[in-house]
Amino acid sequence: MKPELLGSYAIGAVNRRFLLMGYLPSLAAGFFLLVLVWAGAPGSRISFADAWHTASRLSAGELVVLVLGTMLVTLLLHPLQLPLVRVLEGAWPTFMAPVRRWCVARQRARRRVLDTRSALPPDNPTRAQVQAAGEAGLQMRRRFPPHERVMPSALGNALAAMEHRAGSAYGWDATVAWPRLYPLVSEQTRAIVDDRRDTMDTAVRLACTAFVTAAAAVALLWRSGGWILLPLLLLSVSRIAYRGAVGAAVAYGEAVEAAFDLHRFDLVAALRLPLPADHAEERDQAKDVSAFWRQRKPVPFTYRHADPPDGGSQ
């Protein structure tokens, strides 16, 4: 590879998403664990003055090795982002089936609470009751899929709600339609979708990194007396980041839903299908196309190509 091409590739790799989602959490976690080691862990005597003394004596070469080593680790872990999201969604191994069932029951109970709150009183509801019921119903639709599709985690439910809700009013199955719609959305819409997805992924990575770092810190501080409580701070960071990931997933779902609202006819036109005349025809067409993508169900499509320019040939 030519040097200029290599440089362009390196600059492209170190983008905002890479820095925020992967590199900075990894650098912070690595430095935190190094400080514990410099302070005397694992051992019974922890001195952060010793850690500061060691850190202040690092040479420029050692700092470069630390920065580049962290970047290498981050690059190696980058493909694991999607599996991390899946794990926090609730895609757990078979041996965790009892835990999964308990978590699903807990999430369904939370959904029932919102469902109950979204019901209006039978006689003369007040304006406050109508507003409260509407807010509960909105939260239920944003944060939970239908009862039978409830996932064991809040993040999984927020994303499952997006998959169920986005495009469903028009007959689209978002699971198969979204990868085909995304390349067709406008730059403004794509910027919003990407920003919210990046926010969710960053929060997921921070939650996982803080949790793993807390586990490593427990192993290092096991014999340090009161310092064993220090990982609780990291667990708090992990919890806050996870809650942020759930909120970001809800916002991401709203952006995807808006993309279907605004650009679904762009997808129909790109497929060379006739634009539907009304909502009923639109739903039937979208259901047929979604079934074809999902199951390769034979559908007698009739294509409509653009008319050639005057004097041209088709």
Image (cartoon, rainbow, N blue to C red):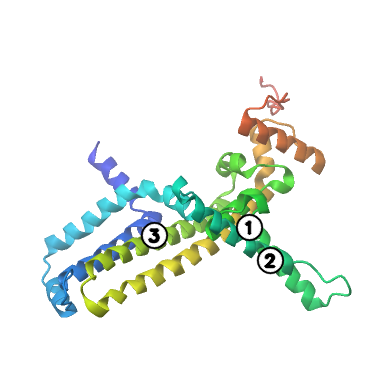
Q: Is residue 207 left or right of residue 142?
A: left
Where residue 140 sits, quadrant-wise, is bottom right
Residue at image mark 2: 114
**Residue in the picture at 17% in, 57% down:** 65
Mark nearer the N terminus (2 vs 1): 2
Badge 1 local density, few (<14 within 10 Å), some, or many (20+)?
Answer: many
Question: Is residue 32 positioned above or below 267 on the image?
Answer: below
Residue at image mark 3: 208
Where residue 40 sits, quadrant-wise, is bottom left
Q: Disc 1 marks which amino acid?
A: Phe
The kind of secondary structure element at disc 3 is helix
Q: Which mark is residue 144?
A: 1
The kind of secondary structure element at disc 2 is helix
Q: Is residue 72 left or right of residue 238?
A: left
Where residue 295 sits, quadrant-wise, is top right
Picture coordinates of residue 133, whole percent (x, y): 75, 70
Give yes or no for contact between labels 3 and 2 (Cβ–Cβ under 8 Å). no
Q: Disc 3 marks which amino acid?
A: Cys
Instruction: Compare residues 60 and 50 and report the one nearer the observer.
Output: 50
Picture coordinates of residue 128, whole percent (x, y): 77, 78
> Can residue 139 be spotted in the picture?
yes
**Residue in the picture at 24% in, 70% down:** 222
Q: Disc 2 marks which amino acid?
A: Leu
Q: CA distance from mark 1 to mark 3?
A: 23 Å
Mark nearer the N terminus (3 vs 2): 2
Q: CA distance from mark 2 to mark 1?
A: 10 Å
Q: Is residue 276 left or right of residue 182?
A: right
